[in-house]
Image (spheres, rainbow, N blue to C red):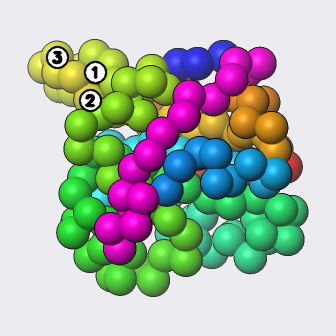
Amino acid sequence: MLEAGTKAPAFALPDQDGNVHTLEEYRGKKIILYFYPRDNTPGCTKQACGFGELYPQFLEKGAVVLGISKDSVASHKKFEEKYQLPFTLLSDTELTAIKAYDVWQEKKNYGKVSMGVVRTTYLIDEQGMIVRAFGKVKAAENPAQMLEEL
C-alpha cells in the first residue's frame, strides 16, 4: 500500500462505457480512489452501493469517487446498471494501476494462498497527492468513513 504524502501514480483506464479516464483529468478535485476485488460479490456490492448512496454528499464536498477492479468493461457496465451506480468504475484488466498502487498482494482464504486485490481506499488531493491511505477496509463502513475524512 502506498503511504500518505506520496504522489498518486498516473493511470489511463477505460470506464464502464469504454471511455478512458486519467488521473490528470481530475486535477483540482479531491478523489476517493477505491480498489475492490470483484463486481457483484457481497462485500464489493455493499461498498459500491454505499458510495452510490452518499455520492451527492461527496460531490457537495468537491470530491469524485472512482472504483477500480480487474473486471472487464462489460462486467462494470452490468454492475453499474444493476445497482444504478452514479460514479465511475474503471477496468484494470492488465493490473497496471492495481500494481502501481500496491494493492495486488498475497491473500489467504481458508488456508489457500493466492494473489488478489486487497480492498484499499485512497484519498487524493487536488494536486494529485495521496492524503490518506486505508488498507484492508471494511466494505460496508468505508463510504461513510471516507465522507468523514473529507
Residue 55 vs 9, above or below: the answer is below
| In contact (CB < 8 Å): disc 1 and disc 2 | yes
Is residue 17 found left or right of 128 in the rendered image? left
Estimate the spatial distance between the alpha carbons at disc 1 and disc 3, rounded to whole Å: 6 Å
Stretch of the chain drawn in magenta:
4-20
Specify the principal SS of the magenta part. Answer: loop
Inspect the image, locate mark 1, and give the three-letter code of the amino acid beneath it.
Lys
From this view, report whether residue 125 is shown above or below residue 130: below
103 w.r.t. 91: above or below: above
* Position of 16 relative to 81 (above/below): above
CA gap between label 3 and label 2 equals 10 Å
Q: Residues within 10 Å of mark 3 (few under 14, many from 20)?
A: few
Asked if residue 77 lies in the magenta stretch, the reply is no
Q: Where is residue 26 in the image (x, y as percent from the top left)?
A: 68, 53
Residue bearing mark 3:
113
The residue pinned by badge 2 equals 116
Q: What residue type is labelled 2?
A: Gly
Q: How far apart are marks 1 and 2 (CA)?
A: 6 Å
The location of residue 62, given as percent across then percent down, is 83, 62
Label 3: element kind: strand
Between 8 and 149, the residue placed more toward the observer is 8
